[in-house]
Image (spheres, coloured by chain):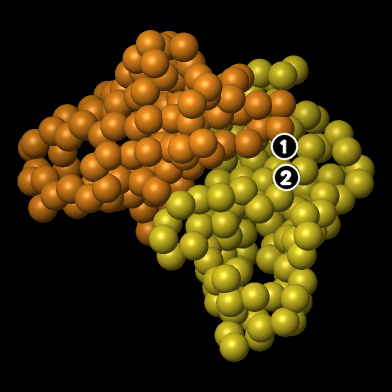
């Protein structure tokens, strides 16, 4: 069974640009969550989607948005990039429920490393 | 708001020895999950061990075990017979459980564990 796949793995953007990151969850998983990981702030929750609906959102500005498609694949978009958006963006999928299966387990991808210059 | 604190930014241990990583959390909820996730240098986060708050028995997974003290809001991870492959960042995480519907993971800042030969 393929794991969570994130693309691209690495990307470099300049301030003011926008970026779209993609996440393909494990087959059968309907919940997709996104996390931002930085050395200073650690891992912070961005948002969670289930059956194409955003069910939970972290404390990030409106420049951060996402969506989920009918096949459970998800994208997140960051507009008007700032230097502070440089981070590893992690996607995680789970079988069902807001945070996972009855075990509460999330399965993570390897992440997309975004560098903003 | 729930918080997760890992007081040890870095730790090291000799191969084959035992090491304990500390984690404390703060919540007013009664039903929740606690996790330890491992993030090796390759970056993919994987689940090490999981504990449901309503279970008094400490979880064990092979060489990994936890000491869950609900009243003290403490959740430490013990790694026995440490192996070189255990070298990684370890994150303690908290997940609320609203009667089966769950929120998002709240992570600690992590502990960087180095296993030395």
Closest to the observer, B43 or B105: B43
Q: Please identify the quarter of the rendering in which residue A34 is found.
A: top left
- From the image, state whether disc 2 or disc 1 is nearer to you: 2
The residue that mark 1 highlights is: B33
Q: Which chain is yellow?
A: B
Tell me: A9 left or right of A44. Answer: left
Residue A63 place in picture, x, y as percent = 23, 28
Task: Give x and y (percent) for residue B59.
Answer: 82, 50
Mark closest to the chain's N terminus, 2 or 1 = 1
Q: Residues within 10 Å of mark 1 (few under 14, many from 20)?
A: many
Q: Quadrant of the C terminus of chain B?
A: bottom right
According to the picture, the residue beneath numbered tag 2 turns out to be: B50
Relative to B40, does residue A10 appear above or below in the rendering?
above
Residue at the spot 70% in from the left edge and 63% down from the top edge: B22
Which residue is at 37% across, 23% downward? A73
Q: Nearer the viewer, residue B25 or B59?
A: B59
Residue B26 showing in the rendered view: no
Q: CA distance from mark 2 to mark 1?
A: 7 Å
- Circle 2 sits in a helix, a strand or a loop, which is it? strand
Q: Are marks 2 and 1 in contact (CB under 8 Å)?
A: yes
């Amino acid at each position: 069974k393929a794991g969570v796949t994130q693309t691209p793995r690495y990307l470099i953007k300049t301030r003011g640009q926008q970026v779209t990151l993609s996440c393909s969850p494990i087959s059968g998983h309907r919940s997709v969550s996104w996390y931002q990981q930085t050395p200073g702030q650690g891992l912070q929750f961005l948002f969670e989607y289930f059956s194409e609906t955003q069910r939970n959102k972290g404390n990030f500005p409106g420049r951060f948005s996402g969506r989920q498609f009918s096949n459970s694949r998800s994208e997140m978009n960051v507009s008007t990039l700032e230097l502070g958006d440089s981070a590893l963006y992690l996607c995680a999928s789970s079988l069902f429920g807001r945070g996972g299966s009855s075990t509460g387990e999330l399965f993570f991808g390897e992440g997309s490393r975004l560098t903003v210059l | 708001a729930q918080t997760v604190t890992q007081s040890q930014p870095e730790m090291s241990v000799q191969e084959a020895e035992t090491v304990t990583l500390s984690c404390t959390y703060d919540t007013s909820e009664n039903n929740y999950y606690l996790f330890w996730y491992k993030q090796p240098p390759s970056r993919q986060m994987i689940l090490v061990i999981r504990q449901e708050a309503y279970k008094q028995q400490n979880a064990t997974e092979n060489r990994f075990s936890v000491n869950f003290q609900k009243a003290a809001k403490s959740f430490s991870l013990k790694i026995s017979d440490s192996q070189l492959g255990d070298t990684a960042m370890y994150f303690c995480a908290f997940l609320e459980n609203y009667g089966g519907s769950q929120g998002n993971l709240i992570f600690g800042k992590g502990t960087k564990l180095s296993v030395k030969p």
